[in-house]
């Protein structure tokens, strides 16, 4: 399980516009954004890493913040090397997985429609709602739209939630392009004023269902707190392994 998840992370980073392979690492860069949550590295699973490899990786980041995300068991010797190189742990997250046999799809909450956004207006509305949910601005840049379209062209999934009168974008969620039957579900977000109505679970289930319809057999995600855990577990996700976020 852990190896499949880590291989999917490697595949995702290799698809970035400026992906770089540095020894046993893949560094996924996107010049359209400085976000360290988009520009980060991950180790190739099962490949030996040395202190010199870590030094080379830090150099490859240039002026960007050196940062890694990875499944802990895929490179158990890496964390001590990173700590010795001045990195600090941001967070350890347990990831959850779902399969076609465990997914439960709830009904969409009354007053909202879920759909796959395609026009620039719908994509921007969904991205804006996600940004607000995560504490950002209610807007989407041309680079955001380009990134979303590029990812969807590779097989990524997006689901938006809108009020039935089409006046407000309430939230949305995405999943990265699948690799070897595996895909990460991410960006599940609902505007504060529309929370606690079942939207987060409905969006997550809708994204996951579309992945399984494409032939994916393993979907995974990370939860940010107890409330999120309950939402995801209710629709069929279960804890499976640990991921590490670490930066310098």
Image: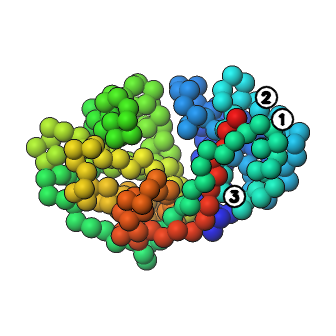
What residue did someone put label 3 on?
A: 72
**Residue 226 drawn at (x, y percent):** 42, 60
Q: How is the image coloured?
A: rainbow
Cβ atoms at labels 1 and 2 below 8 Å apart: yes
The residue sitting at 76% across, 50% down in the picture is 79
Residue 59: which disc? 2
Mark in the foreground, 3 or 2:
3
Question: 10 Å neighbourhood of mark 3: few (<14), some, or many (≥20)?
Answer: many
Left or right: residue 163 compared with residue 151: left
Question: 10 Å neighbourhood of mark 2: few (<14), some, or many (≥20)?
Answer: few
The residue sitting at 36% across, 68% down in the picture is 235
Dot 3 falls on a residue whose secondary structure is helix
The residue sitting at 35% across, 29% down in the picture is 137
Sequence-wise, the earlier of marks 3 and 2 is 2
Q: CA distance from mark 3 to mark 2?
A: 23 Å
Extreme residue in the top direction: 63
Residue 55: which disc? 1
Left or right: residue 227 compared with residue 244: left
Q: Nearer the viewer, residue 177 or 128?
A: 128
**Residue 29 drawn at (x, y percent):** 63, 33
Dot 1 falls on a residue whose secondary structure is helix
The answer to whether one can see residue 165 in this image is yes
Q: CA distance from mark 1 to mark 2?
A: 6 Å
Extreme residue in the bottom direction: 101
Q: Quadrant of residue 230?
A: bottom left
Dot 2 falls on a residue whose secondary structure is helix
Quarter containing the C terminus: top right
**Residue 234 drawn at (x, y percent):** 36, 70
Left or right: residue 108 compared with residue 47: left
The answer to whether one can see residue 6 in this image is no
Quarter containing the N terminus: bottom right
């Amino acid at each position: 399980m852990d190896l499949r998840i880590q291989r999917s992370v490697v595949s995702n980073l290799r698809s970035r516009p400026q992906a770089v392979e540095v020894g046993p690492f893949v560094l996924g860069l996107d010049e359209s954004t400085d976000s360290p949550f988009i520009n980060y590295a991950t180790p190739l699973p099962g490949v030996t890493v040395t202190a010199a490899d870590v030094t080379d990786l830090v150099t490859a980041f240039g002026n960007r913040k050196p940062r890694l995300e990875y499944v802990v068991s895929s490179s158990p010797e890496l964390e001590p090397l990173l700590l010795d190189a001045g990195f600090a742990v941001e967070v350890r997250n347990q990831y959850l997985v779902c399969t076609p046999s465990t997914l439960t799809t709830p009904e969409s909450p009354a007053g909202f429609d879920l759909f796959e956004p395609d026009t620039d207006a719908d994509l921007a509305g969904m991205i804006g709602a996600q940004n607000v949910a995560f504490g950002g601005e209610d807007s989407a840049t041309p680079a955001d739209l380009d990134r979303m379209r590029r990812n969807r062209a590779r097989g990524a999934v997006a689901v938006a939630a809108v009020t039935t009168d089409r006046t407000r974008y309430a939230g949305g969620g995405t999943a990265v392009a699948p690799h070897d039957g595996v895909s990460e579900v991410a960006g599940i977000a609902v505007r504060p004023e529309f929370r606690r109505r079942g939207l987060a679970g409905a969006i997550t289930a809708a994204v996951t269902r579309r992945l399984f319809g494409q032939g994916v057999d393993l979907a995974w995600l990370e939860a940010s707190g107890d409330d999120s855990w309950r939402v995801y577990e209710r629709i069929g996700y279960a804890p499976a392994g640990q991921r590490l976020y670490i930066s310098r």
